[in-house]
Amino acid sequence: MKKSLTAPVVLGALALALGGCATPPAATSAAPTATAATSVAQSDFKACMVSDAGGFDDKSFNETAYAGLTKAVAELGVQKAEVQSQVAADYAKNVQAMVTAKCDIIVTVGFALGDATAAAAKKNPDIKFAIVDFAYTDEDGKNIAEKNVKGLVFNTAEPSFMAGYLAASLSQTGKVGTFGGAPYPSVTAFMDGYARGVTHFNEQKGKKVAVLGWDVAKKDGTFIGGQDPFGDLSGGKKSASNLVAQGADILLPVAGPAGEGALQVAKASNGKVGSMWVDTDGCISQEQYCAVIPTSVGKAMDVAVFEAIKAAKDGSFSNEPFVGTLENGGAYLAPFHEWDPKVSAETRAELDKIKADIIAGTIKTSA
Amino acid sequence: MAEPEPRTNRLRAWASARWRDWTITLAAFVLALIVGAILMIVADPEVAGNFAYLFTAPGLALGAAWTKVSTAYSALLMGAVGSPSALAATTAAAAPLICAGLAVGLAFRAGLFNIGAQGQAVVGSMAAAWVGFSLPLPPVIHLIVAVLAGLIAGALWGGVVGWLKARTGAHEVIVTIMMNYIASGLLAWALTTSAFQRPGRSDPISPEVAGSATFPQIFEQLHVGFFVALAAALVVAWVLDRSVLGFSIRAVGANPHAAGTAGMNVGATTIITMALAGALAGLAGVMAALGPSVNGVPTPLSEGLVGTVGFDAITVALLGRSKPVGIVFAGLLFGGLSAGGLAMQSVAQTPLTLTLVLQALVVLFVAAPQLVATLVPFLKARKGSVSLTGADA
Amino acid sequence: MIRPVADEAEHGTGLQLKSITKRFGTFVANDAVDLDIRPGEIHCLLGENGAGKSTLMNVLYGLYQPDGGEIVIDGAVQHFANPKAAMAAGIGMVHQHFMLVEVFTVAENMILGREPGLVVDLKAGRATVRELSARYNLPVDPDAVVEDLPVGVQQRVEILKALANDAAYLILDEPTAVLTPQEIDELMVVLQRLRDEGKGIVFITHKLREVRAIADRITVLRRGRVVGRAEPGTSENELAQLMVGRAVDLTVSKQHAEPGPVRLEVENLTVTNSAGAVVVDGISFEVAGGEILCVAGVQGNGQSELADALLGNLPVLSGSVRLDGHDLTDGTPKRAIIAGMGFVPEDRQHDGFIGSFTIAENLVLNRFDRPPFAKGAALDLEAINGNALRLRDEFDIRTPEVQNLGSSLSGGNAQKVVLARELSRELAVLVASQPTRGVDVGAIEFLHKRIVAERDKGTAVMLVSTELEEVEALADRVLVMYRGRVVGIVGPDTPRDVLGMMMAGCSYDEAVALAAAAPTEGGDR
């Protein structure tokens, strides 16, 4: 008998906890639930996004792309819809779900969605597609994308080169490290650029700073691997600890959310180890670790996504891939934040020089 | 012992017990939806914010909450069963879950806890996909060979576990877990070799499976594989209840000592059961590798292709009480939740995490009938009258 | 109903169950049962399996809630929501199936469920065990792991556990079912001592000899009702009739054996157990068709392993087993079964029976894969069902439906299923271990008759038993085993005390000499 009272009591308590006796704002303030961006004219244009298995809250890759969508909603007044994927089998279904939801442009995040995006683009020529981190090219690098698909790719090797140079200059042990989630090209580009930056430092300074976790010649390195390499936080931690145990004191984790493991290791080292961040400015997206992040290798995916949506809305959309570089700001080295005092004026000047040389093409950041 | 009861009495007791089962399942759904609704309201700051005005302007708060919840739930329902294409999506998601659920359920009936459906599905998907994209075979034969390859790969992967258990006494839980690691490592490695990796790609993805090795589409996502899964359930049901082998499997599962004393070969039964379970889980992998996705072609083999089907299968099997019919329904329930969950995301823009929580809540309540009976008092009151009859004194 | 008793005032009014009724669905397990237990008496509750004895005691112990009636202790009405409440009121119970954690030590089991806080006070547990052991003269090593202890000692632990609560009333549910004759005698002494200390003891059993030996008063239950109360002097036949509801023949009427040719030959058989210890040590014997060879011995002297090795369930170290000339040494159970060996395992629930299988399935457990029960890979459910219906009638298995689960059967009926399965085919030899353990009187009579009938069909029967009555009733020859060896093979009319001494390891001649020197004590119970 007592039991039957439980449900009403719980509901009542819940109502009290949530509820109050405040008065709602006057109805004259025009639809309080509407968006705050009242200054922007609302548009019927619908921009949509499909994440890869990392999800939109990965503090990295998907999250940055998503920021571009949010920005488009705020600044262009477009409508939005989104779907998160969990496994590879979801990709085609999820893109189709966005087609069904009558989107005008569908942005897919990650090269893993390459097949699904191409297939959907072919089937739905009236819908624009953009895909982050993937470009449809043949063996000669010629663009073979459908008319309505735009690839958004980033030459992350350029800022990674600068990050490698910086890491080498900051290292006390003479060893720096990097590891990836899985050997995808978009991952290894960071690692390779980083290692080449260290080599450049050694050549300039006549030093012998070693890189652990990537071998430029063999094009192979340390990866977390397993079922969920980019979500495996403990795997990231293990990889980072391994590198630290071998003497590395500046790390570059290229593993999405799993890279946070390296930040944890750095934080636990009491200042002995620093860990960079990738895709976004770690001092903003991983604020609590800012003290251990010397810099971040940024990919302005938000900008690229925003521009793609804007172009689709304006009618200036083309299937020509967007390539983010140091020059156009699509790939960048983030500010040093709390590490600012540790970076010497000399190093700053050298980094500026390197950036100029990369843009000028006098320094090659990849093979 | 009780005196023989009149038949009608027993029938009534049976019907009454059945009625109770169904009402409890229904109540489980309702409870899950209620809890889910509360979470949805609390999780959305805009909707929850309106509750500040609950006592002054109840319409505002309740209206917003109602809109939120009803949009989400109608999307869930429509996405799962609301249209022919929704039903097709449900069957596509259910097919591998049914197969893998059978793999866990069958092993469970033999007293074996098969945690390895995941690895068995992975190797099954590898074998089927490889045949699908590299062997040039004529239609129909290509599909059959690919399916058989998946079944055999899964059977070997499971059979090894049975053999180790029968021969050395190695516990199947530990061995299957390790075999899962080996399978996913094997797949990751294979995708870097020229045998599996798509030419011209540096990321781990295989070529697309040939059309001749793809399960024929029937209606949108509904493909022949779903009927293969139903057939598998029928076969397992027949094997368990009607066959000599099933008798041994159940006997070994219920009491291995008595089974051995009665002349059954416990070790051989263990090996055969694990091989059969492996084949069924392999079939789940085959579904993932050869089942056409919404765009008509199967998703190419990659590291996450089978997802977590082998682990979801444990829930499916437990929910289905390890009985084939129960597993089919549990698989359809999961498939519906998955298809409806996508609609909740894309149509009602409910976050994925909330969708997953709702799925978990449904499973939780369905799997815990006692909890439901406790929470819904009138069901509890009926309990005494349909209790077991004739307890031994 | 409750008769006044002279010393009632001295002890208070005791424990009374008044008109207890308990139903399960439509089945009435206890129908207005009255029972009173006085301090300082052993009250025997007698009844066949399924008569409602255990249900009644579970009501008293708070495991079941009665549908009617009340429990009164010393004049106060009690309601026991759970066993804890019953324990607090001074009731202790020793269950038929022990409620001990097998991998824990005795001391750990003792403090289980009564840990005062988070800290396990093992020292106090040990002290409690020692103190109780000394007080009731029940020696137990507090640090022994329960599963390593003989069954009788495990039961002693159960009794100590019940006593540790300062129980004034002690319920023992079929305490002798799992004990050897020696252990039973020891238990009787313990119970008498407890009675003399003023404990009220309920002794549940269906063994008439025990009742007559120990009871101060007897209440007989049949089909949930009290059908009679008796004094200890009542004859076994009268008690049996009261219990079963009809006249019961307690002696097995059997013709003299007419042994035919030798069918089972065992030569120099040596068997080790899983731990590698030699448990059967160079045993040789023969059993002829048409005779019953009883293997007598105290539990744990290698009889169980001998039977298992004959079946092929235990590997043979050396020696040979031949059945009708076929070599069965190092075979599998399957081979032995096909060669015509019927096997009734000692532990029915563990080795002979699957509770979650239907009765029909249990009846074909060893030949479901052969015609007529199998057609190719498929089972012939009709044949299996038909077989079950036939055997149910032939072996008087009391169940409304053969599709009911095996676990719904009482011990006696379950044993009938096992025996029916083994005897319903052509046998060369029947190896039966403890075929009547945990079985009620009516069923024992039936089982014994069937075994004798099987002998008369020309089957060689090897019967392993620790119960001397059974040995005396059935044996044509008696093989006494002690520590894995044959002490001697003697005739069926060997006196009980001589057999008893042989079971303790004396040779026949020594035993006869000793028996002659020390006249039997007996009669003082």
Image (cartoon, coloured by chain):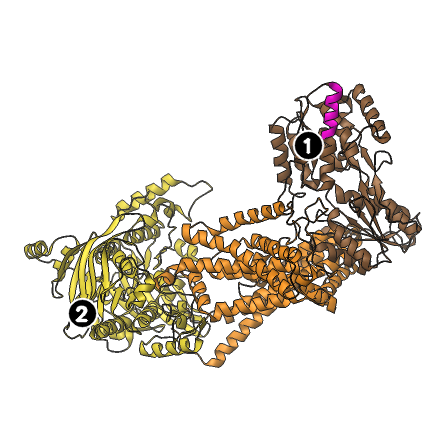
Q: Which mark is residue C291?
A: 2
**Colour yellow maps to chain:** C
Please name the predominant secondary structure of the magenta segment in the image. helix
Res. C126 image quadrant: top left
Inspect this view and state whether residue A295 appears: no
Q: Secondary structure at mark 2?
A: loop
Q: Which residues are magenta?
A: A195-205
Q: What number is the disc on residue A217? A: 1
Rendered hue of chain A is brown
Q: Nearer the viewer, residue A310 or C216?
A: A310
Across the whole image, how many numbered discs are drawn on residues?
2
Figure chain in orange: B
From the viewer's perspective, is residue A101 above or below residue A365? below
Give me the chain letter of mark 2. C
Taking the image as shown, residue A174 lies to the left or right of residue B21, namely right
Tag 2: amino acid: Glu
Position of residue C156 relative to residue B252, above or below, is above
Q: Quadrant of residue A158?
A: top right
